[in-house]
Amino acid sequence: MDIKGLDYNTQREKLILSEYGREIQKMVDVAIGLPDKEERMRCAMSIIHQMENKNPQVRQSDNYQQTLWDHLYLMSRGQLDIDWPFDVQNAENLSTKPQPMGHPTSGNMSRIRHYGLLMGEVFEKLKTMPEGPECDELVRVTANQMKRNLLAWGHGSIDDERIADDLARFTDGRIQIDLSTFRFDRISVTSNEPAGGKRKKKK
């Protein structure tokens, strides 16, 4: 709703540095438009003084004067033509946000999150590992660990066929275990009971 005579913050231009408020931003905008360079400089000095009063915690920094002039440069969008008393070339870096970090299970790893990130590294190793006793032992250890991880995640179904299918899929078909000869370790299903869970009382 637009009511004539009322000025809402939501209808105004977004502040560059909100901690200094809209009045100081207006002062900066006025300073930019002043025709005389000396007058712009005097106005800038006055703005810096007001900024320091408005945001006194900035004084806790050893180089707070540098910070204030950097902030003034940012609020002027680099358009304030004065002889800057401090080097403001790196001021833009203050407003640069860090790039978001990727989640460790993003991309292809998200499909094997129930097996864990380390198991993903084992799958990658098995893709290129030469055949032999060492590879056979790693396959045996990997398959049994996959079964334990499924139990810990509580996925319910931990049949051997699923382990064999997943192992083949996550190694791009490189590892195929023969369930007619392959023997899993004996794993107790009761280990899947949630920690702190209450067992049902026998009637």
Image (spheres, helix red, strand yellow):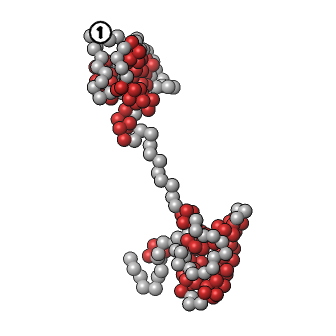
Q: In this view, does 150 lie above or below 10?
A: above
Q: What residue type is labelled 1?
A: Thr
The quarter holding residue 161 reads top left
Q: How many labels does the image show?
A: 1
Q: Position of residue 66 (x, y in %)?
A: 66, 68
Q: In this view, does 50 lie above or below 169?
A: below
What's the residue at 52%, 74% (across, down)? 77
SS label for mark 1: loop
> In the rendered view of the protein, which quadrant contains the N terminus?
bottom left
- The local crowd at label 1, few if under 14, some if 14 to 19, many if 20 or more residues have their Cα within 10 Å, is few
Q: Where is residue 39 in the image (x, y as percent from the top left)?
A: 63, 88
The reply to whether residue 116 is in sight is no
What's the residue at 57%, 81% (across, down)? 81
Q: Where is residue 180 in the image (x, y as percent from the top left)?
A: 27, 10
The reply to whether residue 118 is in sight is yes
- Judged left or right of residue 9, residue 171 is left
Q: Position of residue 75 (x, y in %)?
A: 55, 73
Residue bearing mark 1: 181
In front here: 198 or 92?
92
What's the residue at 32%, 11% (across, down)? 182
What's the residue at 33%, 24% (across, down)? 167
The outermost residue toward the front is 130
The quarter holding residue 86 reads bottom right
The quarter holding residue 45 reads bottom right
In front here: 75 or 152?
75
- Judged left or right of residue 89, residue 201 is left
> In the rendered view of the protein, which quadrant contains the C terminus?
top left
